Image (cartoon, helix red, strand yellow):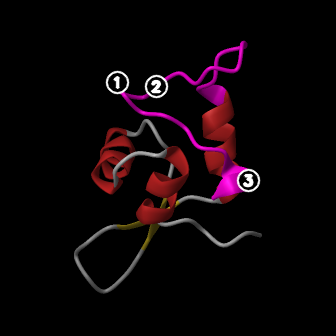
């Protein structure tokens, strides 16, 4: 199993802001794993495989990415 990605990791790979990743998680548009902790903050992570699958599900057949919001551009996972 791969190391789970943080919100910052996901933001870097998607080329968007960290707050945008948390909005996607909060809205349920992007899957995440909730990790119980002692603080009141939600610790959320996603596996690289789940993120790649999400990207594939949000990609048009011609290869151009469908944007979760206007202006969002995807970066290759290989270049992260």
Q: Name the magenta segment's main secondary structure.
A: loop
User: Is residue 67 within the magenta segment?
Assistant: yes
Q: Report the residue at 70% width, 20% height from top.
A: 63
Q: Which residues are magenta?
A: 57-80
Identify the residue shown where x is 68% and y is 32%: 56
Residue 57, image x and y in percent? 64, 28
Q: Which mark is residue 70?
A: 1
Tag 1–tag 2 contact (CB < 8 Å): yes
Q: Name above or below for residue 41 compared with residue 47.
A: below
* Left or right side of 78 for 17: left
- Give the number of the mark in front: 3 or 2: 3
Residue drawn at 59 percent across, 43 percent down:
75
Specify the label residue 67 is tagged with.
Answer: 2
Q: Quadrant of the N terminus?
A: bottom right
Left or right for 7, reference 38: right
Q: Position of residue 80 (x, y in %)?
A: 63, 59
Look at the numbered disc 3 and give the secondary structure of its residue.
helix
Q: Is residue 78 above or below residue 59?
A: below
Q: Secondary structure at mark 1?
A: loop
* Rendered view: 34 above or below 13: below
The residue where tag 3 is placed is 78
Q: Residues within 10 Å of mark 3 (few under 14, many from 20)?
A: few
């Amino acid at each position: 199993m791969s190391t789970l990605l943080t919100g910052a990791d996901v933001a870097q790979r998607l080329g968007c802001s960290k707050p945008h990743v948390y909005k996607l998680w909060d809205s349920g548009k992007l899957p995440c794993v909730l990790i119980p902790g002692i603080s009141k903050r939600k610790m959320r992570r996603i596996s690289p495989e789940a993120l790649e699958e999400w990207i594939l599900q949000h990609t048009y057949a011609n290869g151009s990415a469908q944007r979760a919001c206007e202006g969002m551009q995807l970066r290759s996972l290989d270049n992260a």
